[in-house]
Amino acid sequence: MTYGLVLSGGGVRGIAHLGVIKALDEIGIRPSAISGTSAGAIVGTMYAHGYSPDDILKIILKTKFLYAVRPSLSFTGLLSMEAMEKILKEYLPDDFSNLKIPITIGTTDLKHGKTVFFSRGELIKPILASACIPVIFKPVEIEGVKYIDGGILNNLPVDPLLRKCDKIIGVHTNPISNNFTGSNAKNILERTMLMAISGNTKQNAAHCDYYIEPPELGGYTGMDISKAEELFEIGYRYTKENINIFSHQ
């Protein structure tokens, strides 16, 4: 049985992917292929390179990785992704071919308004592009084309794994909570983006044999930087509590 693993975007909430992966590891489910976007691309690539979920969490905490990608909505100008690039280069190889598990990374072509997948060649630039939050960060240019966050058009990139694996596991870390107060501009912007991408997520979820979406994540924002360990635990606990879904198909 071969498994494909699809990892959504979700900002800081994407750390929950690590908890999910740890729970899957413990029951012997290891993907033969991964597809991810934004936070899912970062987490998925590190896992594909051979780091364990616990190791990845330690790296995130040690390097203060989350502060390198923290949005700063000052509107004084677009931010660069140099800090994130520096960290990725320290822990990841420079080419897709050096990964232990093949991964496909989803991005959005800003000019043509379409999803573009990367799965070969230079590794770091596609990851940066996939996590490039529009309006906040400068678009990432690859071979003359400007790219932004892959989750904008396809936040659950199941497409690359269709008909390539026996079973597909989709993990979504962007549930939309009903408890929204709209207290500040950052929260309103994030809420708007979540609603905008929810349609394509639901459509793609229908192609997954197993779908994991911890509802508790709805109580966190994609910018809750100090909650990394909590988010990891939520993903782990929810998957362990629902592990029986893997024996029903």
Image: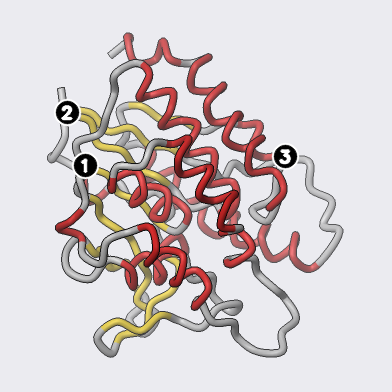
Task: Place residue 55 in its image quadrant.
Answer: top left
Alpha carbons under labels 2 and 1: distance apart: 9 Å
Relative image position of residue 35 (x, y in whole percent): 30, 49
Q: Quadrant of the N terminus?
A: top left
Q: Secondary structure at mark 1?
A: strand
- Left or right: 173, with 49 as reference point: right
Q: CB of mark 2 within 8 Å of CB of mark 1?
A: yes
Alpha carbons under labels 3 and 1: distance apart: 30 Å
Q: Secondary structure at mark 3?
A: helix
Relative image position of residue 215 (x, y in whole percent): 62, 31
From this view, report whether residue 225 is shown above or below residue 27.
below
Q: Label 2: which residue?
A: 2
- Left or right: 55, with 6 as reference point: right
Disc 2 marks a residue whose amino acid type is Thr
Which numbered tag is attached to residue 219? 3
Q: Residues within 10 Å of mark 2 (few under 14, many from 20)?
A: few
Q: Label 1: which residue?
A: 33
Relative image position of residue 236 (x, y in whole percent): 52, 26
Residue shown at 29%/23% (left/top)? 29
Residue shown at 13%/40% (left/top)? 164
Q: Residues within 10 Å of mark 1 (few under 14, many from 20)?
A: many
Disc 3 marks a residue whose amino acid type is Gly
Q: Earlier in the sequence, mark 2 or mark 3?
A: 2
Q: Quadrant of the C terminus?
A: top left
From this view, report whether residue 75 is shown above or below residue 24.
below
From this view, report whether residue 111 is shown above or below residue 55.
below
Residue shown at 79%/68% (left/top)? 185
Q: Earlier in the sequence, mark 3 or mark 1?
A: 1
Q: Secondary structure at mark 2?
A: loop
